[in-house]
Amino acid sequence: MRVLDVRKAKVDDVEKLLPVVEQFYAHFGFAWDTEKKRRLLKEFIGRRDLGGLWCAEKEGRMVGYASIPFYFALEFDGRVGLLDELFVLPEFRGLGSGAHMLKEIMNELPAEGINRLRLEVDERHPEAATLYARLGFVLDGRQTWSRAV
């Protein structure tokens, strides 16, 4: 497989990203509102202080993306990235696409002032855990909890 082109997304990429993001939402059974996601993608991509959205293309076709919001944690000595969404189109899975994307992104994170990358793994998708373990991620003995506010 020819290597994917991985780069930080620009606002101009939103229309090409929307169908891929929609597939991620469908895959997990999340609610989808095209106009709302279009607005949120533009805001997130346009505001570098919020984090970064990286996209992966092959021959001009958008084939995946990763959303990494940033936050500050004393515990981790500064800025942290949270791999919130990582998605590769089904036909590009199992070919090293996800690993390639993450390696490229992790190489760029120090320039963003990020010294740690955290993530969640959905227990229904053990293949994701296998990928992350192969790239050096480890369980830290915590559970992720959330609540709407």
Image (spheres, helix red, strand yellow):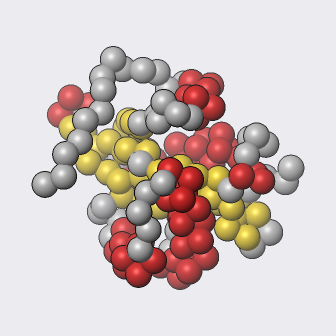
Please report the residue visible at 30 percent of the width from the left and 23 percent of the height from the top. 142
Q: Quadrant of residue 146?
A: top left
Please report the residue visible at 45 percent of the width from the left and 77 percent of the height from the top. 34
Q: Is residue 18 left or right of residue 90?
A: left
Q: Is residue 64 above or below residue 114?
A: below
* Picture coordinates of residue 145, whole percent (x, y): 25, 35
Q: Is residue 39 above or below residue 91?
A: below
Please report the residue visible at 32 percent of the width from the left and 51 percent of the height from the top. 70
Please report the residue visible at 41 percent of the width from the left and 81 percent of the height from the top. 35
Q: Is residue 140 left or right of residue 136?
A: left
- Which quadrant holds the C terminus? bottom left
Q: Quadrant of residue 118?
A: top left
Please state which of residues 114 and 30 is positioned toward the viewer in this rendering: 30
Q: Is residue 97 left or right of residue 141?
A: right
Q: Could you tell me how many numbered marks the image carries?
A: 0
* Picture coordinates of residue 43, whole percent (x, y): 34, 74
Asked if residue 135 can be seen in this view, the reply is no
* Picture coordinates of residue 23, whole percent (x, y): 58, 62
Asked if residue 120 can be seen in this view, the reply is yes
Q: Is residue 147 left or right of residue 33?
A: left
